[in-house]
Image (cartoon, helix red, strand yellow):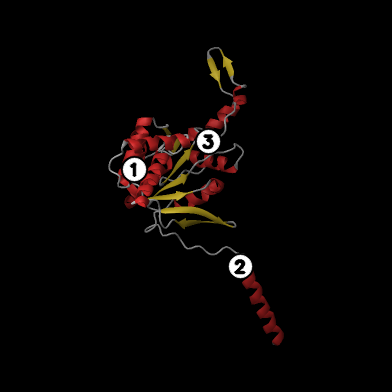
Amino acid sequence: MDKLEKLCNRADRLLGRLENFLPAEQPEPDWQTGVAFHWRRQGNTGFFQPILHPHQINLDALYGIDAQKQQIDQNTRQFVQGFSANNVLLTGARGTGKSSLIKALLNQYANDGLRLVEVEKQHLVDLHDIVAVIRRRSERFILFCDDLSFETDEPGYKALKVVLDGSVATVSDNVLIYATSNRRHMVPEYMRDNLDTRHLGEEVHPSETIEEKIALSERFGLWISFYPFDQVQYLNIVSHWLADFGIVEMDAKTRLEALQWALARGSRSGRVAWQFARDCAGRRQCVN
């Protein structure tokens, strides 16, 4: 009996040690109270991790991109109301509001059943598993892939292509993919790719390499492009954010500082304008 008891104790200790190496059991996501989630992996297990404090930004706070706002807002409204809508690729200049626009859409439509799941590039191979979990839910889901850039042989590149195209299985009606990228085709493009382009009479036939590189972006039904702001647009955005921080009027000195701030960063963008306004307001408050 003593031997059996010792054996059981040893087994309990061994199991206790093994449990430390096993992934913790994750609770089921609460889709009713949570609106934004990360898709995470622990070992071989994937799970939805709630974002407890999602970024609160309104569409009205995004200046200089009215045409882009109108396009993606219309597409999202159709989707939330149960009508047909497209997967969206947002490309172009950095800091112009691509990611902020998607977060603002969640804030706009969360009460109507919209949910956001952020999926990092290395986890795109799990897209089929993610869709399988949420496809029978009543909520509407945007799978958000931020700042995508691929090499063509990456597994996530092929996984995203398959999900966008539907493969053999039908893509769920309650899921769309919204992706942002600084590259229009999300893959590096080289001069050598053009060397195999063929000219037959007046027709131009791109090489197979080029065709492969544009294959992913073509699977998005809606392309929305973002462009660098000119000086007037930049200063208007600075003025808006200064007012948001309590600085009602932008004087000549502040205007010059805003231009120097952008010059130092080599970019006139909404992000740079917000950063300047934040710095300017902080400096004034510190002096006072």
Q: Which residue is mark 2?
A: 20
Q: Position of residue 95 (x, y in %)?
A: 44, 39
Q: What amino acid is at disc 1?
A: Trp
Disc number lying in front (1 or 3) = 1
Query: Is label 3 in a helix, a strand or a loop?
Result: loop
State the residue lying farthest toward the top.
Answer: 201
Q: Position of residue 3 (x, y in %)?
A: 72, 84
Query: Based on the displayed image, in which of its 4 quarters is residue 156 positioned?
Result: top right
Query: Is label 2 in a helix, a strand or a loop?
Result: loop
Q: Which residue is mark 3?
A: 186
State the residue lying farthest toward the front.
Answer: 287
Disc number lying in front (2 or 1) = 1
Q: Earlier in the sequence, mark 2 or mark 1?
A: 2
Asked if the residue under mark 2 is in contact with the one under mark 3, i.e. CB atoms within 8 Å, the reply is no
> From the viewer's perspective, is 48 left or right of 237?
right
Asked if the residue under mark 3 is in contact with the one under mark 1, i.e. CB atoms within 8 Å, the reply is no
Q: What amino acid is at disc 3?
A: Met
Q: Residue at x 62, y 72 (%)?
A: 16
Query: Based on the displayed image, in which of its 4 quarters is residue 98 positioned?
Result: top left
Residue 175 or residue 52, whichever sits in front: 52
Q: Position of residue 283 (x, y in %)?
A: 38, 48
Q: Earlier in the sequence, mark 1 or mark 3?
A: 3
Q: Earlier in the sequence, mark 3 or mark 2?
A: 2
